[in-house]
Image: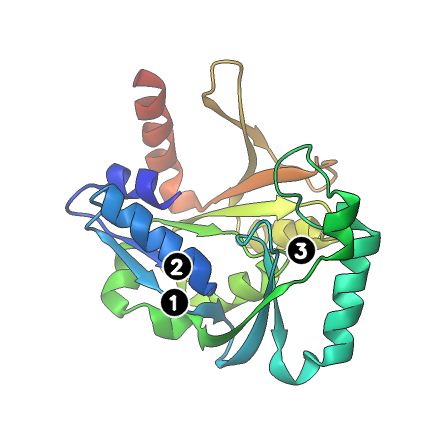
Amino acid sequence: HVVPASRYVGELGAVIAIEPNPEMVQRLLANIRLNHAANVRVLHVAAGEGAGKFKLFAHPLHPGTGWLVEQEDATPDYIERLETSFREHPEAAMLPLPGVGFAISERQSFKLVVHDVEMAAFGGLLSEYDAARTSVVKIDVEGAEMAVMRAAEFLWDRPNPPCAVIEYEERYQGAREEIFQFFARRGWGLYIVSCNEKGLPTYNMLAESYVSSQFENIFAIPPSRRDFCTRAARLRRSQ
């Protein structure tokens, strides 16, 4: 999403990409160079509620999928149990490509890629200038949505807070209801973002009783930005 965002905000705007996985950081930097996205800043760190040292367990065939575990909890026994779980239940992990499973040989040799990563308090990663200019925050954190959203309360509680786009997966039980309550009590509008047959985005109001699909993007819009989002949608349809 970084390159489209870079093009959308233009030369006077900026994109801040936060990525803890060193392999994904190198891919991101290469993509930025390839697309001459000079307005993108990459922070090689995990964002959370506080600072600390963590182990990042990355999927060997899909490095964009990973799980952070505090270093003291990442014992050899824990790692073995996690890898055994994936070998026995590959459907519990993100598959390499949609509809493609693991071959038996891949299951037997499945080994998570482990990285040592630093976590920084989200509030310390953005300057006051950056926070004041932020209009959209995209969150894709493999089940840690609520931790990141709580860490970003300094943004949500501003007079003109940014919109939030949260990638949600049904396998993280209960997260959707927490996300709903978190923004609903602030009076924000919540929508499910999908595409119509023309490939254009559609927005369906999210109700607390909504039965979710396996994957979806939740779009949370503060009252102060509803006009902004309406204008952006009209601009996208006209292109």
- Name the amino acid type tagged 2: Val
Q: Quadrant of the C terminus?
A: top left
List the residue tagged with mark 3: 178
Q: Residue at x 47, y 77 (%)?
A: 118
List the residue tagged with mark 1: 44
Label located before the other in sequence (1 or 2): 2
- Residue 25 marker: 2
Residue 202, horizontal then vertical, whole percent: 51, 25
**Relative to 224, 111 lies left or right:** right
Residue 106, horizontal then vertical, whole percent: 72, 49
Residue 227, horizontal then vertical, whole percent: 35, 34
- Name the amino acid type tagged 3: Glu
**Relative to 210, 5 lies left or right:** left
Residue in front for this viewpoint, 21 or 160 = 21
Query: Does residue 156 appear in this view?
Result: no
Asked whether the residues under the numbered discs 1 and 3 touch, taking CB atoms below 8 Å apart as contact, a structural biologist would say no
Disc nearest the viewer among 1 and 2: 2
Q: Residue at x 40, y 42 (%)?
A: 1
Asked whether the residues under the numbered discs 3 and 2 touch, taking CB atoms below 8 Å apart as contact, a structural biologist would say no
Q: Residues within 10 Å of mark 2 (few under 14, many from 20)?
A: some
Tell me the SS state at disc 2.
helix
Give the CA separation, mark 1 to mark 2: 7 Å
Picture colour scheme: rainbow
**Relative to 181, 25 lies left or right:** left
Asked whether the residues under the numbered discs 1 and 2 touch, taking CB atoms below 8 Å apart as contact, a structural biologist would say yes
The number of numbered badges drawn on the structure is 3
Residue 171, horizontal then vertical, whole percent: 73, 49
Q: Residues within 10 Å of mark 1 (few under 14, many from 20)?
A: some
Disc nearest the viewer among 1 and 3: 1
